[in-house]
Image (cartoon, grey):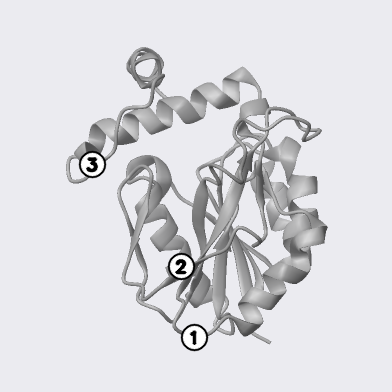
Amino acid sequence: MKRLVVASNMYNEIAQLPEWFSFAQEIADSGILIVDSGSNDGTIEFCKKQKNTVVVVNNTIRQEGYGPARTELRELAKKHFPDAHWIVYFDADERVEPSDFHKLRFLKDYLIDNYDVVAFPRIDWLDTSMTKMAKDYHVQPDWQARMSRLHAPVVYVRRLHEQITGYRNIYCNINSPKIHHFHRSAGKEKRDLVGKLCAKLHMEDTEFGHTYPEHHKEKLYRNLYISEGL
């Protein structure tokens, strides 16, 4: 059996944590790694009470962006869970259904060695009851390259819309486990915070910022960030 670390960057996610840990603990046979940006709602305290969970508090994702934050999670996973073979990232507003757990275990244990990365189709739900999705994942699956081998020289780049370097091959299959994403059903305060952070990171990405387009609401969030900060 090849062991898996479930990792996440978090900030003020207390309302979602019981459900998130419920599924994460089912699949994290090596452990759970949380890097928190300084939550003040009890997120840090809740995470520290969970079994086989390591919590690190720093501001990497806000200062350097999603790419460096993902790479940092890989390095921390190797340090704190040396028995692990794989790492997988799930945000606090993302879930994997129990019906897909066996597929995830099959991939981590039996996927042939020349695949260093596994991409999962993500479904953006408009409601928590999962009755309506933003786009049909069969047509637009929103591939998320979230699982990678820890012994591979994988590095994430770009502050926003992170990309992967240093891998051999990415395994993509529409029948792989689905990431169920609930950001669109979050409250306005949470969505505004994420929007402002993304606008900030795009402005600051002088190396790769020109390689991805501006989101249709980015000007709004950029102005909010300039006037309100994070």
Q: Which residue is mark 2?
A: 74
| Crowd rating for badge 2 (residues with CA inside 10 Å; few <14, some 14–19, many 20+) | many
Q: Quadrant of the C terminus?
A: top left
State the residue lying farthest toward the front: 139
Number of labels in the image equals 3
Residue at the image position 60 percent from the left and 18 percent from the top: 188
Q: Foreground residue, 198 or 78?
A: 198
Amino acid type of disc 2? Arg
Secondary structure state at the residue bearing disc 2: helix
Residues marked 3 and 2 touching at CB (< 8 Å):
no
Q: Earlier in the sequence, mark 2 or mark 1?
A: 2
Quote the CA–CA distance across marks 3 and 2: 24 Å
Q: For mark 1, what is the residue?
A: 113
User: Quick check: 15 left or right of 229?
Assistant: right
- Nearest to N terminus: mark 3 or mark 2: 2
Q: Residue at x 77, y 32 (%)?
A: 128
Residue 3 appears anywhere in the view: no
Instruction: Give the percent coordinates (x, y) of residue 88.
Output: 57, 64
- In screen coordinates, is 156 left or right of 23? left
Task: Say which element carries label 1.
Answer: loop
Q: Amino acid at mark 3?
A: Thr
